[in-house]
Image: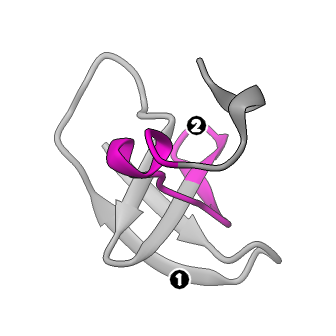
């Protein structure tokens, strides 16, 4: 499957082939950059945050308890 990665403003970052699947993935991580699907095969860069499970256990906000 061919995918095109673009910046948040639509500039080309990279084009590549990924392993064929039944559908395109929702998110692609490319190095330290994260892209979400915009159209079939086209991904736009997004801001992403990864929360470590250990950090959740020690946070000061009880309303975030799941």
Q: Closer to the camera, 9 or 20?
A: 9
In the displayed orientation, state which residue is furthest to the right.
Answer: 9
Across and down, in percent, residue 13 comes to 53, 83
Mark 1 crowdedness (10 Å alpha carbons): few <14, some 14-19, many ≥20: few
Q: Is residue 47 magenta?
A: yes
Secondary element at image label 2? loop
Q: Does 59 sit left or right of 32 as displayed?
A: right
Q: Point out which mark residue 33 bears.
A: none
Q: Closer to the camera, 16 or 54?
A: 54
Q: Closer to the camera, 26 or 14?
A: 26
Circle count? 2
For the point 40% across and 21% down, which residue is it? 23
Of callouts 1 and 2, which one flags the residue occurring earlier in the amino acid sequence? 1
Across and down, in percent, residue 2 comes to 36, 51
Q: Point out which mark residue 13 bears.
A: 1
Q: Is residue 48 magenta?
A: yes
Q: Does 10 sit left or right of 36 as displayed?
A: right
Mark 2 crowdedness (10 Å alpha carbons): few <14, some 14-19, many ≥20: some
For the point 43% across and 39% down, which residue is it? 57
When asked about the image quadrant of residue 7, the answer is bottom right
Reading the image, the residue beneath label 2 is 40
Whole-Å distance between the Cαs marked 1 and 2? 17 Å
For the point 57% across and 49% down, which residue is it? 59
Secondary element at image label 1? strand
In the displayed orientation, state which residue is furthest to the left.
Answer: 19
Q: Closer to the camera, 46 or 50?
A: 50
Q: Is residue 22 above or below residue 4?
A: above
Across and down, in percent, residue 24 comes to 43, 32
Q: Quadrant of the C terminus?
A: top right
- Image: magenta residue range: 36-58
For the point 33% across and 47% down, which residue is it? 54
Colour pattern of the rendering: one colour
């Amino acid at each position: 499957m061919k995918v095109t990665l673009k910046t948040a403003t639509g500039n080309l970052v990279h084009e590549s082939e990924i392993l064929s699947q039944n559908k395109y993935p929702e998110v692609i991580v490319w190095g330290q950059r994260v892209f979400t699907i915009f159209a079939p095969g086209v991904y736009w860069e997004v801001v992403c945050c990864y929360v470590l499970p250990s950090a959740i256990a020690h946070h000061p906000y009880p309303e975030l308890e799941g």
